[in-house]
Image: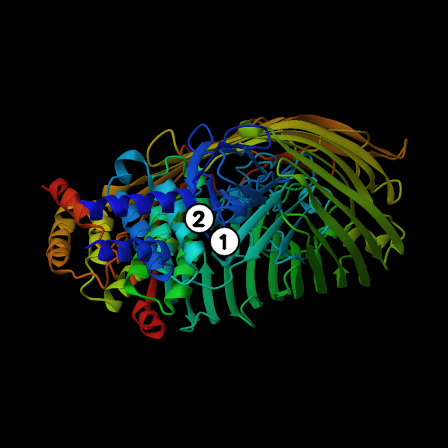
Amino acid sequence: MKKLALFFAFALLALGGFAQSAKYTAAMQAQIAQLATAYSNNGFPALANSFERIGDAEKTQWLPYYYAAYATVMSALMEQDKSKTDAIADKAELLINKAESLAGAPNSELYVIKSMIATAHLQVDPQNRWMQYGQVSADNIEKAKQADPTNPRPVYLEGQSKFFTPESFGGGKAVAKPIFEKALAMFSNFKAAGELYPTWGKESTDYFLSQCK
Amino acid sequence: MRFIFLVVVCLGCLAAANAQTQVSGQVTDKAGKPVRGASVGIKDSYDGATSDSTGHYRFTTEEKGMQQVIVSCIGYQLWERPVAFGGSALVLDIRLKEQASELKAVVVTAGSFEASDSKRTTVLNSIDVATTASANADITAAIRTLPGAQQVGEKEGLFIRGGSGEEAKVFIDGTLVNNYFYSAVPDISQRGRFSPFIFKGTVFSSGGYSALYGQALSGALILETIDMPERSEASLGVSSVGLSGGYQYLNNKKTFSGGASYAYTNLLPYFALVKQRVDYFKVPAYHGADANFRWKTSKTGLLKFYGTFQANQLGLRTADIDSAALKNAFSLNNYNLYGNLSWREKLGDNWRIYIGSSFSTNRDDIQNQLQNHQNEKQEIAGLPWNIKTFNALVKGSLAQAKAVLERKFGGLTALRFGGEYQYFHDDLSYYDTLARHNIINDHFKAAFAEADIYVTNNLAAKVGTRVEHSSLLDKANLVPRLSLAYRLGNLGQASLAYGIFYQKPEKTQLVIDPGLSYTRASHYIANFQKVTATRTLRIEAFYKKYEDLVKTYPVLNNNGYGYAKGAELFWRDKKTVKNVDYWISYSFLDTKRDYLNYPYSLTPNFAAKHTASLVVKRFFTDWKTQINASYSFATGRPYYGFRYDAGTAKYEVFDQGDTPPYNNLSLSINYLPNIGKQNSKTFVVWVLSVNNVLNQRQLYNYNYSYNGMIRQPVRPPANQFFFIGCFFSFGVDRSQDIINSNL
């Protein structure tokens, strides 16, 4: 027993390689866990910084940059001072491009963030930017769906876009509701590709669905 | 139990070996204000923190020895420094320098209204032009709702700050446009030849403009054509004045686009319905064809071509001012060809090149004759009758090339320099009692340099100079252009501008006396502005001094002079009332000049003391309809009757006064039935507009008979203008292609 314990202790001291990936996983998990409460405590900017630091230190992982971009675009979407939104969205774009170059190829989750970045730009001046960014946002939702038809997040974003579009423009709660329902069903069947892969969106879908009644 | 104890002990050893260092401090900007949201971290480590709203941060790290501390924040330059970590607590206060960014930096704006579709807050874009109720999609008509421009309805052109229409010039993609407006018709102002929708950016400079441009005493309207369209599209338009159609192609990779369109305008049906004051014996009819291509020659290079050919005619009769028994019949045939080819490219990281060229040729065939009430030609000897029967053939061409090189020096500091060459060829024939034929050529060369110097993000200067030479005048000039801008924190920014501007005399004057020299204006401008995403406030004051203006008697000379001073206000607000966008502009102008045949210094008849406009736009989402209204007001402009007194050999004023104030309320409605329809390939816009809804009497000036006994008011051909049109675009929705080519 003693020997075993000693072995364990020494192992702990000597563990370079294992520690590194364990440390990475643990750090990521800790930050990912905080994403859920970031809405209420405006925690996105700090989380974005943490994820970016992990990404910068790791150098080969695309997920830290993906989450950094996600947290950044969320803070852009939540920013009340519209004159700041563009700069924050530009930063998110920088991060998602880093994620994409490390991921090697575009994937469904990256398109999801790109759609959100376009939406953030759109929000600054919807009347004048609708033609340009509305199209980019919609295109990326389509690309995200094509790249992974089981991914519920582009469906959720589509519902959200419909939710905020006036009825006379082909949107509204009645149009959004079945889309959110579809997204919700997809969330229950969704299997993340790996331990740290994105799973966010279900709570927001629940929330919007409750607003559709 | 013992096992757990051991593990705890070992973990304790681990902790001791990796003693933690606590790092804390405050992040501030150069002014000492806390910076929130900055990321403070150690290079190649996860450890770090984010500064809070007071700029403070705190974290612990196990890193030891010299480590690189990195601080980053959106809008600030990266901060990096080696710091020794040894276990004892560190306090590290950090001062961040603001990043030079186009979005945040002070912009040199005195004198100019910049409007582009870029991210920067815009003043006017093509949609704004199309939805300004009084403008009927004419760019300069929309510009007239901005401060600095006069409400002149009897003559085309932008009359800026006491300057005449000829003293403002229009540039497309960097090069001068010789015949921007449709050819002049007596007492009726003409529209611009170019649709607002071919332009992505508009800079309206009411003074103090860049050294890259010249030969305009008052100001410049600088237009930039669009780069790549969003998609392939066919368009069709039907309106109360004509038909139009076109096709624009965009390849899948968005690297090449080409298109052509044609428009036919004929006012016959409209004039049949709405009575005009003048009798059109040839109803205005316009053919216009255009073609374009845009080709991405590399990732950063773009070659653009835009060309148009236009042919139009009109003929109108008015009562002859010297005799109730006669009519004056004027007719015009016009052909205009315009082409513009430009290329821009990045050369390495710091250099950019821009090359522009354009060619235009214009032909006006004008015939004027006296007619009796049976519309038969009358030839009467003696003044003033004999000079009222004439033919004129006015041909003018302009070929030009311009090159600009730009070198960036970190941040936003940049140097631009280059040169331009213009070849003017004018061929003027005029037949009344005599036959005259003149050809005038001018090889006009200019070189210029301009530097944008950012001392800090808050203080910028634009320093420029320009040297010009005209072979026709055989004279050169060298001018300074200088502006400064200072940002007053969040309050806004203040700018100052100074410049000297030269302009060649008009070709009709140079034909008579090629020995004339440049006319000259000096501008002094002070400006304050505060711009947010939804609101713009601008206050500007100016003083202009005119020298060497052309006088037409006793002989042509450069002895004219004058001044203009004034103050202007512009306020645009998209925020206060939901879905409502409005702007207010006001201009005060005090100007006098002695030029042409003025007997002494007078306020010119194109200058009103007070001018104001209110433009309101509201989108009604439920109706998919936008309603636009604009109201313009100007105090009366002076009018003068001049008479030549042979005794003193001078002109004298025998009649003068002020016209009644100008009022114009216009309304337009845009209905977009397909807006918001998902995957809709057809986009439809209905437009209905009424100019001068209240049918207010507009009187611009007076014409005087030869003997001075009779005066006739100059009024628009009709008080009101009505327009109804429907415009379709059939997009070729290729989002599927884009998806497929990307996956």
The quarter holding residue B305 reads bottom right
**Viewed as shown, does residue B544 lie left or right of A2?**
right
Cα distance in 3D space between marks 2 and 1: 7 Å
Label 2 Cα crowd, 10 Å radius (few <14 / some 14-19 / many 20+):
many
- Front position in the image: B267 or A184: A184
Question: How far across and down, in percent of the image, does residue B293 sit?
Answer: 52, 70
Task: Give the residue pinned by disc 1.
Answer: B196
- Front position in the image: A68 or B438: A68
- Which residue is pictured at 51% across the width and 65% down the height? B288
The kind of residue tagged 2 is Ala
- Front position in the image: B370 or B185: B185
The kind of residue tagged 1 is Pro
Say whether disc 2 or disc 1 marks the residue closer to the N-terminus.
2
Task: Say which mark, if any, is on residue B130.
Answer: 2
Q: Which secondary structure, mark 1?
A: helix
The quarter holding residue B651 reads top right
Q: Are marks 2 and 1 in contact (CB under 8 Å)?
A: yes
Camera sees residue A126: no
Q: Disc 1 sits on a residue from what chain?
A: B
